[in-house]
Amino acid sequence: MSASDHEIISVDTPFRGFFRIDRYRLRHRRFTGDWTPELEREIFVRGHAAGVIPYDPKLDRVLVVEQFRTPALVAGRPSPLTLEVPAGIIPKGETPEDVARRELQEEAGLTAKELIPLYTFMPSPGGCSETVWLYAALVDLSNAGGLAGVADEDEDIRIVVMDFDDAFARMLRGEIDNAISIMSLQWLALNRPRLRKA
């Protein structure tokens, strides 16, 4: 589809808070060649993000962070405390890799020996403009643990280090139930023999 196959008629912002909702009026060419009627679509604009799964190939352990998430509470998940890989919104002037390294330090107190790009994807293209850059960080987890987070961002984070097999089993049981963590663990399942050998 080229630029001549869609037309944005208007954009307004009915809500602006920590996140933003934009309302688009637009139309686009159908697969049959004719045009849709004017459509109205609300888009959740939350910015782009980067996430990173810390992995210690020597110990075969991963690190996730546990924190309270209001959407998990509202969605009726088993617990509002989620197990996630470190992640954050990409501010203007920073690259996805910058954010992955910064979040690794802020949320886990770690520095990557190597940062491996995994995927770039849209978690929910039907309603959200967010794109996520996902990485694996090779790290030393022998002394990792405790509490972390940036105080002026009201972060309250517990660092959880576990054997890869335990993390993967927890994912299969639905205890690790967010997309970037699931994708990270599935990537590790496919690639950890190579990482451990190297």
Image: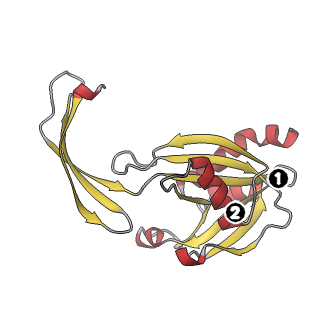
Mark 1 = which residue?
A: 60
Mark 2 = which residue?
A: 105
Circle 1 residues within 10 Å: few <14, some 14–19, many ≥20: some
Residue at horizontal 55%, vertical 46%? 133
Residue 148 seen in the current view: yes
Q: In terms of depth relative to the viewer, which is nearer, 118 or 2?
A: 2
Q: Is residue 160 left or right of residue 50?
A: right
Viewer-side label of 2, 1: 2
Q: Is residue 155 left or right of residue 36?
A: right
Residue at horizontal 54%, vertical 57%? 178
Quadrant containing the C terminus is top right
In the rendered image, residue 93, in percent from the top left (x then y), is placed at: 51, 52
How is the protein colored in the picture? Answer: secondary structure
Residue reaching furthest to the top: 33
Hey, what amino acid is under mark 1? Asp
Q: Quadrant of residue 164?
A: bottom right
Vertical side of 88 occupied by 25: above or below: above
Q: Is residue 39 left or right of residue 188?
A: left
Residue reaching furthest to the left: 37
Q: Quadrant of residue 54?
A: bottom right
Residue at horizontal 37%, vertical 51%? 128
Hey, what amino acid is under mark 2? Gln
Point out the tag, 2 or 1, that comes first from the N-terminus.
Answer: 1
